[in-house]
Amino acid sequence: MSSSPKSISISVCMGTGGIAAGGAEVMEAFESELARRGLRAKLQENCTAHKVGCRGFCARDVLVDVVVDGQRATYEYVQADMVSRIVEEHIIGGAPVEKWFAGPEYEAFHVGQTKVVLSDCGSINPEDIDAYLAVDGYTAIQKILCEMWPEEVITEIKDSGLRGRGGAGFPTGLKWSFAAMAKGDEKYIICNADEGDPGAFMDRSIVEGNPHALIEGMSIAGYAIGANLGYVYIRAEYPLAVQRLAHAIEQARQREFLGKNIRNADFDFDIRIKQGAGAFVCGEETALIASIEGGRGMPRPKPPFPTHRGLWGKPTVINNVETLANLPYIIRKGPQWFASLGSEKSKGTKVFALTGKVRNTGLIEVPMGIALKEIIYGIGGGIEGGRQFKAVQTGGPSGGCIPTELLDTAVDYESLAQVGAIMGSGGMVVMDEDNCMVEMARYFLHFTQEESCGKCVPCRVGTKRMLEILERIVAGRGELGDVELLLDLGEDVKAASLCGLGQTAPNPVISTIRYFREEYDAHIVQKRCPAGVCKALFEYQVVEPLCKLCSLCVRKCPVGAIEGGKKKLAKIKDRKCVKCGICIEVCPFDAITQVDIHETAEV
Amino acid sequence: MDTLDQTLTPHTNSELDLTAVDEIVARHQNERGALIPVLQAVQSHYGYIPPEAAARVAEGLKVYPSKIYGVMTFYTQFYLKPKGKNRVMVCCGTACHVKGSDRVTRRVLDEIKLSDGEDTTEDRFFTIEQVACIGACSIAPVVVVNDKVHGKMTPDKTMRELRKISEAADE
């Protein structure tokens, strides 16, 4: 043994991404190795292996930090069978296994980020309240309970410039002041963790990675508006987040950070978890309230706003997870510090789920005002496989697609709205030349149409008609005038729908028409899909000179659409072909190609 | 779509044990907005919401059966029919969609035959669902098999997972 370590700390990423990549097995392997080699017994509490929440760079999971005597090393793509070598060579032998170290991308991924909400996420054990206390957790709530009146807290938050992170960007302090002024014997705080946007997982990662920050944030909000009870409305699809939050609430109660007379102050606050039952529209405030009250989650007209008549008819503030998790940091470091981050009208940072065709996918936190380009090409490392960037989609089904020429757009509420997208809750999906923008529009509208609650006609019927037109276009049955009709209908649905779902549902369609009109025209006029995605508009052909008669495609075709054999050229029967693309994938000679239907028609 | 009658009228000769429903209702008796948590608990006990159980919830919580029917059919989480032994969820969120989840779905549906409009095989061995985002976008496309999240899936990898389950059951 070359050296004898005095302290060992190992942290294994065990967010949903980490667990899917094998995090639990890696954790177990470390535990058993440390025990087997007697390190645990020898060093006792100076030898720890703990799970941490999402560290952001999920594409490289399982990520493991090994800290030996204060020296940190990060390993990527760790699997259970690599653990014994790491323990033997690095921890005991003092020679880190450098070839498994996280590469330069790991560094590049983090260098452009500014972490506030995520600052402790991924470094502390989310299931241990002491880990949160060790990073000054729960000092913010103690500070306001001892030193500040509720109005002063509201003023601090107003001064910080914090705006709602759920998407619309309403100033948080202002919203609180409405509820604080409203008359009512009971008031409520609701945390909206019904992260329904497809392509977004910021809230899940925060709840999984640092649930105590959310609890502390809710207590701060509760104190400010005079609420004694908070609800977390969270998706049932996030079982790990629900479990960690429930565990954290229990711990907070034991340590008297929740309950009666918190820290001996004259303030009671408790939190209950309500699991959503799967309805996108419940992200809308009034629908969410209806759902907590036990009914169908359908929105109602506003005003009255929930800050006056909310849950059970009482004044209620609904804030998003990220908004609430920002609060402890703002109180601890002061509103001026927070306001110094970000752009003129959008303060602080924003967490995004960077996904799609970008090289480095994961959870990122950037200062407001950063250019889209910096996110995609800096932190994201550019497009996968050297392909060409086509668009980035922000705001999910309520947002829009932003093309190459607008990549200098700053990420803040106003700038994104100006280019026809929205900030949204933080989904950021990158698309390349292989994605068809008409098909993307159809995809989003299909989603919102299914999720429309059906209460108001413009949304219920309007999205349906728009979807029918889009389905016709991608099927090669588009007609001249369809684009104008879509725009016309879209404006009506936006103007006349009752809630945010309908008011924003046409955005993906309108923005793709605005920036990718030529793709719509290609589908409608030439019956051609430039990206080669829309199945009705292409077919497969065997390039006869290249076919070596191996018959691999014949055997692999799942629907038996290819004729041929050892001595016979392969031939694809169009009527049977389902265009799954397996034949193209398996052909070793690239002898099968995809051709536009209109080209074959001309031949 | 089932009618209200079919969903809430108990089948004759049913011997479903409803004590669990009574216990669940009792636990939530004085809670405001209890209907959804009660239905969630009932479903987690039976695997779906049997009509007899829904009727019993209506009695126990003193709400109209029509309201229960409304709630059950509004939220995608509630099942009015029993599910298969093995649950397969193919994520169709944006990131998965962009990365080709429809190819996974099509392959699964090509190989595991379902009747029209059904999501469960006749022998109730598999339930295949297409779900909106499960929030694991950075490892898209994602397939969840019996609560285990599998990332970066291809049609082949997915079928391998499903075959493993079938083979384990055959043994």
Image (tube, coloured by chain):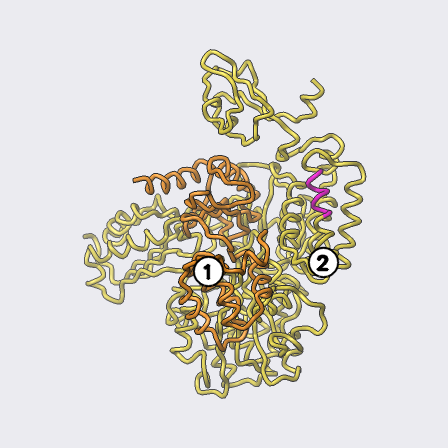
The colour of chain A is: yellow
* Above or below, A46 relative to A12: below
Q: Are marks 2 and 1 on the same chain?
A: no
Which chain letter matches label 2? A
Residue A36 percent location from the top left of the image: 20, 55
Residue A460 percent location from the top left of the image: 70, 54
According to the colouring, which chain is orange?
B
- Indicate which disc residue B96 carries: none
Residue furthest to the front: B13
* Above or below, B124 relative to B54: above
Q: Is residue A4 left or right of residue A122?
A: left
- Dots 2, 1 in contact, CB < 8 A: no
Tell me which secondary structure the magenta stretch mostly adopts: helix
Work out whether residue A113 can be spotted.
no
How far apart are labels 2 and 1 at the CA level?
34 Å
Residue sitting at x 77%, y 50%:
A489
- Tell me which amino acid carries mark 2: Gln
The image quadrant where one finds the C terminus of chain A is top right
Which chain letter matches label 1? B
- Crowding around mark 2 (Cα neighbors within 10 Å: few <14, some 14 to 19, many 20+) is many
Residue sitting at x 49%, y 26%:
A557
Residue furthest to the top: A567
The residue under label 1 is B43
Residue sitting at x 48%, y 48%:
B89
Q: Which tag is nearer the camera, tag 2 or tag 1? A: 1
Which residue range is magenta in the image? A465-472
Q: Quick check: is A190 in the magenta stretch? A: no
Residue A261 percent location from the top left of the image: 46, 86
Work out whether residue A297 can be spotted.
yes
Q: Secondary structure at mark 2?
A: helix
The residue under label 2 is A503
- Tell me which amino acid carries mark 1: Gln
